[in-house]
């Protein structure tokens, strides 16, 4: 991470407040935010502006030490600490010690809430995947400041299906549970390491304009991403007819508070309530530059992903239906104008969410009303999520 004794001027990405407010006044975002956030801001709050210059000091320091010494040996020590515990590493270097000491369970962690959240997210089935893909991920592409790191690390050349698989596998691992030596915990720390390595690479990249974009994968962008997995996720599910109870919402927010704390999000950006999360989401939007060519290219790549599924001609109709289904969900949540900003067809109406709304609502009522059926709904929901992940794996 780049160290500053005095922070540079505000990155120009955060000076487009008028355009950024337009993003926050469209589709579901506007409907939800208007319930909680009445105050109009003329600029992003100063802590958020400062956050555009901050990365992840502990992991950044470890990566700097790793490349300054023996990267292969350092990576081996990292893997040993992750898989066997930091106490198993002989002559453990100080940066690695500090890193792993920092991820010991925080005092505010409530393991029982993590377990409840896993059950809640598993029972939500395919609807969880749809919200994360067609609302959180696609909507995130409207934020061109966020897009720059994706483009410079090859998101366009790798294709949307590769990113869907990587993110989907991480989410699937996490929602198995976040035990210290479990797949979710280890996958999260691996993602944190990758982020730090990308941050180091992009900071030295000739095409990275820090005066415009700030620090790559900065605290603000990590916080915005974190909110997509919790607050946006919960409200998106409700928009598809899934009844998320207050207790489930509390557990899900706590789950992602801990998970994203592990991934390097500073505690000042972690929220406990939906209201706090929605206010922070609005504020992070004010640091974003308006949609640009990266928005169009990334959105196009994701929207066309269903058309790459399979080659036999008899599958073509399924590909086209899937393509229209995903676009209809994006249109439903983000609205016609945002879909146009993404460069996607505005002629596709939001037809799919109404088709599944009633089914999701009925299943939610049964889930909450009939405790003896809950295991069944959780099992079936997880099977849907696993099936979606396996389909992605088979294509790559």
Image (tube, rainbow, N blue to C red):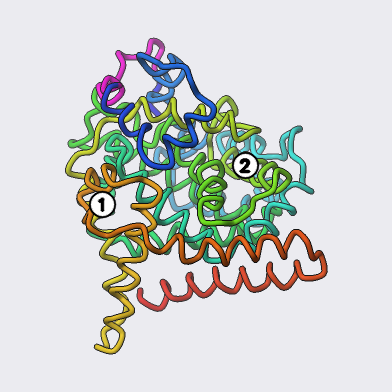
**Residue 359 image offset from top left, x and y in percent:** 57, 67
Q: Nearer the viewer, residue 203 or 40?
A: 40
Q: Secondary structure at mark 2?
A: loop
**Residue 370 image offset from top left, x and y in percent:** 79, 65
Residue at the far top in the pictured view: 6
Q: Secondary structure at mark 1?
A: helix
Residue at the far right in the pictured view: 372
Disc 1 from disc 2: Cα separation: 42 Å
Looking at the image, residue 17 sits to the left or right of residue 268; the answer is left
> Is 275 part of what is drawn in magenta?
no
Q: Nearer the viewer, residue 117 or 53?
A: 117
At x 39% / y 18%, what residue is drawn? 44
Label 1 or label 2, whichever lies nearer to me, is 1
Give the residue at mark 2. 92
Q: Nearer the viewer, residue 204 or 355?
A: 355
Determine the image quadrant of residue 64. Answer: top left
Q: Is residue 104 above or below residue 237?
A: above
The crowding category of the residue bearing disc 1, from other C-alpha atoms within 10 Å (few below 14, some 14 to 19, many at least 20), is many
Looking at the image, residue 79 sits to the left or right of residue 40; the answer is right
**Residue 18 image offset from top left, x and y in percent:** 27, 22
Looking at the image, residue 86 sits to the left or right of residue 140; the answer is right
> Is 9 part of what is drawn in magenta?
yes
At x 38% / y 30%, what residue is drawn? 285
Q: Is residue 324 above or below residue 314?
A: above
Please state the total of marks drawn on the protein image.
2
Magenta span = 4-17
Q: Is residue 68 above or below residue 376?
A: above
Give the residue at mark 1. 298
């Amino acid at each position: 991470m780049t160290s500053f004794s005095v922070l540079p001027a505000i990155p120009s990405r955060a000076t487009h407040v008028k355009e950024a407010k337009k993003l926050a006044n469209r589709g579901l975002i506007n409907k939800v935010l208007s319930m909680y956030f009445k105050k109009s801001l003329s600029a992003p709050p100063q802590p958020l502006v400062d956050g555009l210059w901050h990365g992840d000091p502990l992991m950044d320091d470890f990566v700097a030490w790793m490349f300054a010494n023996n990267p292969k040996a350092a990576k081996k020590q990292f893997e040993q600490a992750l898989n066997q515990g930091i106490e198993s590493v002989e002559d453990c270097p100080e940066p690695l010690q500090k890193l792993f000491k920092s991820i010991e369970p925080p005092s505010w962690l409530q393991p029982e809430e993590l377990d409840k959240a896993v059950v809640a997210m598993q029972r939500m089935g395919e609807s969880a995947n749809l919200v994360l893909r067609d609302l959180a991920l696609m909507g995130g592409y409207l934020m061109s400041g966020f897009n720059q790191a994706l483009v410079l690390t090859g998101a366009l050349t790798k294709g949307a299906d590769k990113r869907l698989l990587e993110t989907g596998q991480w989410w699937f691992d996490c929602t198995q549970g976040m035990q210290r030596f479990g797949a979710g915990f280890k996958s999260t720390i691996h993602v944190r390491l990758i982020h730090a390595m990308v941050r180091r690479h992009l900071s030295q990249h000739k095409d990275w304009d820090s005066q415009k974009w700030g620090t790559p994968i900065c605290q603000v962008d990590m916080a915005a991403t974190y909110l997509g997995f919790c607050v946006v996720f919960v409200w998106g599910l409700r928009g598809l007819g899934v009844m998320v109870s207050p207790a489930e919402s509390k557990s899900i927010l706590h789950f992602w508070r801990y998970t994203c704390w592990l991934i390097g999000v500073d505690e000042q950006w972690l929220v406990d309530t939906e209201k706090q999360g929605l206010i922070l989401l609005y504020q992070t939007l004010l640091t974003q530059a308006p949609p640009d060519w990266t928005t169009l290219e990334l959105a196009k790549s994701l929207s066309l992903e269903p058309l790459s599924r399979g080659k036999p001609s008899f599958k073509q109709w399924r590909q086209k239906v899937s393509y229209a289904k995903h676009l209809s969900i994006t249109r439903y949540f983000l609205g016609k104008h945002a879909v146009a900003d993404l460069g996607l067809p505005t002629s596709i109406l939001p037809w799919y969410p109404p088709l599944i709304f009633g089914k999701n609502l009925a299943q939610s009522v049964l889930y909450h009303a009939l405790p003896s059926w809950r295991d069944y709904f959780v099992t079936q929901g997880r099977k849907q999520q696993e099936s979606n992940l396996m389909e992605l794996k088979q294509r790559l």
